[in-house]
Image (tube, rainbow, N blue to C red):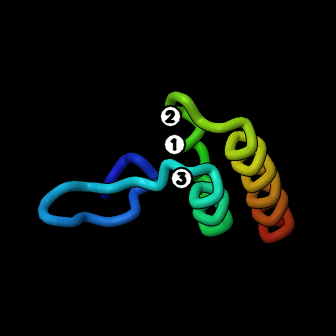
Amino acid sequence: MNKNPFYASTYNGRDFYHIAAADRLLSVQRFTLEQCQAALELPDLQKSVIAALERRIRKLEKEAACISS
């Protein structure tokens, strides 16, 4: 598995990644907790993407807490 959660596809043997904030924001909506944490470790993330990742992490942790209760 690719370590960059913003991986988009492979074309002619080259990996491509979402780099535009709008594309990344759409990707975050489907991320798992592990993918969110990995994405936060990437350099040069847009502020809006960081905020979306942090919101997604809070949501996933809240859902996990409700399930385990």
Location of the C terminus (image quadrant): bottom right
Nearest the eye: 49 or 19: 19
Q: Nearer the viewer, mark 2 or mark 1?
A: 2
- Within 10 angstroms of label 2, few (less than 14), some, or many (20 or more) residues? few
Q: Is the C-beta separation of discs 1 and 3 under 8 Å?
A: yes
Q: Amino acid at mark 2?
A: Leu
Q: Residue furthest left?
A: 13
Tell me, for residue 38, which label it has, or none.
1
Q: Which residue is mark 3?
A: 35
Q: Sequence order check: which comes first, mark 2 or mark 3? A: 3
Q: Position of residue 30 (x, y in %)?
A: 61, 68
| Residue at x-position 80% and y-position 51% | 55
**Residue 26 occupies quadrant:** bottom right
Tell me, for residue 23, which label it has, or none.
none
- Within 10 angstroms of label 1, few (less than 14), some, or many (20 or more) residues? some
- Would residue 58 be found to the left or right of residue 40 on screen? right
Q: Is the C-beta separation of discs 2 and 1 under 8 Å?
A: yes
- Picture mark count: 3
